[in-house]
């Protein structure tokens, strides 16, 4: 009888858990094998374990639930429970986050992540929470660098006369112009065709994208300028957050930070693998020789942010905070 009661109790408990378990939906625009997607699933698995199955999660990659604009709307209504979003929508919510996209602000990803894990990142988390973005982890958005086909661009003067592909973004166009090059707006999918048609001399992106899109076949000089280094945020919807107890919120934050560490580790592995492959393909990698002249040329771009009392303090704090180089 006792064993029977135990078995029935276990069955009822399992049924109750199954009835109350909530499957959380996660959104990302990245592919299934990309470090961001892997880290989001790591987060979901952590939540399942730490809540005893009360919450489970499924990540939907490749923007299958809609593009980022739609995903943000679904996040706001609670139809999506967690997502990783880039700095563009975060800056629209909290304008001073535009500072994080300034060219040559960060030395590399390690520098950026040290800032986001520190007091500045914590302050921004509070500002974003007030706007409905509950940030529980900062991911590495990758460091963008230049790659060219005719010559390496290691010094600030090397860019003069070069035609560099950029997205239709005023900040990127201003940056390339400040370096003495000509910005050429080309859709991402058309970069290879633009190289083939001799419309551009170079472009810019992070190493995994450069490798995945096979741009190295056209431009074999890759210079680690790290001119744009931005974070991405693992966020939870307001609707979900409001349902969680204080203990559950602490659990979610713990899992979010663990997933951020996991993401960074996976991304670094991806970087190393991409670089090893590219070196075998004949790509030549170069380090930035002297950041001073590059930063000096960015003065017109920085000036509005330095003159703005809402952003000047953050610009100065970041620029005077220089963690040890990891490159």
Image (tube, helix red, strand yellow):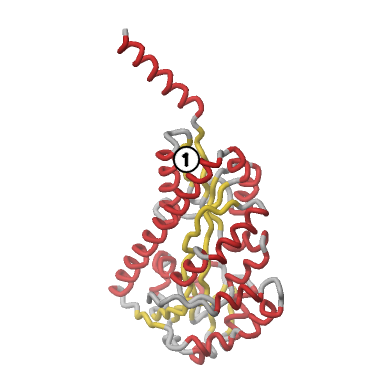
Indicate the position of residue 302 as horizontal and vertical percent values: 64, 80
Please report the residue visible at 60 percent of the width from the left and 84 percent of the height from the top. Answer: 298
Please report the residue visible at 56 percent of the width from the left and 61 percent of the height from the top. Answer: 122
Above or below, comparing residue 88 to residue 301 in the picture = above
Q: Residue furthest left?
A: 280
Viewer-nearest residue: 102 or 254: 254
Which corner quadrant of the image does residue 288 belong to? bottom left
Above or below, comparing residue 66 to residue 113 in the picture = above
Indicate the position of residue 157 as horizontal and vertical percent values: 51, 92
Under circle 1, the secondary element is strand
Which corner quadrant of the image does residue 15 belong to? top left
Per the image, the residue denoted by label 1 is 57
Indicate the position of residue 116 as horizontal and vertical percent values: 52, 65
Viewer-nearest residue: 65 or 51: 51
Indicate the position of residue 126 as horizontal and vertical percent values: 62, 57
Indicate left or right for 92 with 193 as reference: right
Viewer-nearest residue: 185 or 314: 314
């Amino acid at each position: 009888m006792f064993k029977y009661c135990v078995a029935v109790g276990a069955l009822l408990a399992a049924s109750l858990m199954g009835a109350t378990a909530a499957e959380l939906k996660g959104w990302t625009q990245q592919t299934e094998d990309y470090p961001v997607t892997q880290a989001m699933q790591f987060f979901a698995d952590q939540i399942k374990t730490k809540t005893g199955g009360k919450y489970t999660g499924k990540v939907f990659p490749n923007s299958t639930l809609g593009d980022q604009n739609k995903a943000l709307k679904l996040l706001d209504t609670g139809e999506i429970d967690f997502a990783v979003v880039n700095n563009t929508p975060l800056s629209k919510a909290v304008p001073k986050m535009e500072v994080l996209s300034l060219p040559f602000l960060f030395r590399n990803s390690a520098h950026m992540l040290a800032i986001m894990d520190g007091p500045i990142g914590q302050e921004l988390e509070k500002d974003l929470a007030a706007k409905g973005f509950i940030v529980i982890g900062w991911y590495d958005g990758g460091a963008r660098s230049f790659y060219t086909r005719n010559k390496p661009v290691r010094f600030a003067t090397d860019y003069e006369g070069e035609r560099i592909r950029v997205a239709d973004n005023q900040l990127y166009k201003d940056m390339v112009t400040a370096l003495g090059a000509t910005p050429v707006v080309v859709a991402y999918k058309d970069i290879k065709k633009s190289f083939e048609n001799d419309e551009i001399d170079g472009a810019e992106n992070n190493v995994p994208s450069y490798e995945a899109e096979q741009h190295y076949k056209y431009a074999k000089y890759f210079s680690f300028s790290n001119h744009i280094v931005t974070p991405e945020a693992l966020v939870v919807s307001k609707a979900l957050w409001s349902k969680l107890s204080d203990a559950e919120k602490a659990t979610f934050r713990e899992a979010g930070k663990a997933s951020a560490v996991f993401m960074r580790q996976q991304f670094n592995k991806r970087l190393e693998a991409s670089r090893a492959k590219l070196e075998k393909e004949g790509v030549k990698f170069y380090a930035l020789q002297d950041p001073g002249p590059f930063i000096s040329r960015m003065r017109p771009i920085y000036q509005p942010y330095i003159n703005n009392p809402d952003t000047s303090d953050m610009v100065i704090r970041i620029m005077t905070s220089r963690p040890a180089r990891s490159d």
